[in-house]
Amino acid sequence: MPGAEALTGQVVPDAPGVRAVGIDVVDVGRLRTMLERRGQPLLDRLLTPAEQTLCQGASARHRAACLAGRVAAKEAVRKTLGGHGAGCAWRDVEIGREPSGAPVPRLTGRAARAFETAGLSRLHLSITHEAGVAVAVAVAV
Amino acid sequence: MNVREEVVDVLRGVGFDAGELEDGRHLGRDLDIDSTELVEIVVALEQRFGIDIDAEAEGGFTTFGDLVACVTRLLPAVAGRG
């Protein structure tokens, strides 16, 4: 019998900690080319209106990096959902922004249900841009 | 041009060679298609065929043949497409 169990006489629940990690990288130029080819329908499939607004108003270069960061972040978050996230739409994961600039994932629809089914309680997210790529890492606890 | 040939044509438009597009080819392992590239292909198919492919179908695509089957299923019966 494990030590903790012996002391309490009960099964100790799993200690809280990292449950899943997701990472994704998006080539900014490649995404920009795709968006130029497909236009608004591709943008609307990938990003919510709020995300599109968030990336407006900047230079074309900054806008492309912002969009790529959001796409990378969505995929990183979806990876933390594992098999539970099958069939999640891109827009089921929205990447907002705190006043501090930190990205904030908001889950709806299938993604929210997958998050609950997977028994996750919180997501942490980080996005970076460098050398023409956007990289995002998501950690689920 | 039948549905399969039209799907091949759409993928040629995003950089694939017709010769590598066989029904059993795995989108990720064989064709090196990632999730971002797949979503562009899905939108390209929607635009070409005038159909709506939902997220569940998008998440279920494993092989090139799955793309052809999905388009075939969603297309109304139109003369000249087989």
Image (cartoon, rainbow, N blue to C red):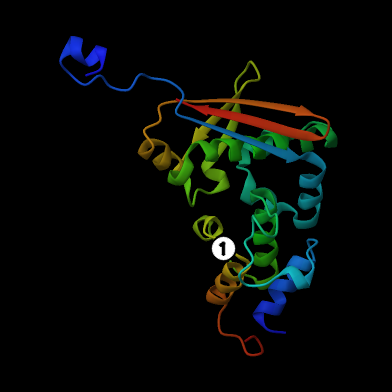
Pick the front one: B78 or A52: B78
Query: Is residue A41 visible from the viewing direction of this image?
Result: no
Using the image as rendered, state which of residue A97 and residue A131 is in the foreground: A131
Q: Quadrant of residue B3?
A: bottom right
Q: Residue at x 79, y 56 (%)?
A: A37
Horizontal side, residue B59 vs residue B11: left or right: left
Residue that protrudes farthest toward the top in the picture: A7
Chain ID, mark 1: B
In the displayed structure, B37 sits above or below A135; it is below
At 44% from the left and 28% from the top, the residue drawn is: A19
Label 1 crowding class (10 Å Cα cut-off): few <14, some 14-19, many 20+?
some
Kindly identify the amino acid type of the residue bearing the numbered disc 1. Ile
Residue A104 sits in which quadrant? top right
Q: In the image, residue B66 lies at what x, y percent? A: 57, 68
- In terms of depth relative to the viewer, which is nearer, A98 or B69? B69
The residue most toward the bottom is B79
Could you say which quadrant of the image residue A41 lies in? bottom right
Q: Nearer the viewer, residue A117 or B33?
A: B33
Residue of label 1: B53
Using residue A11 as the reference point, say whether residue B61 is left or right of it.
right
**How far from the left and from the top, in percent, is residue B4?**
66, 78
> Residue A140: x percent and y percent?
48, 28
Quadrant location, the N terminus of chain A: top left
The C terminus of chain A: image quadrant? top left
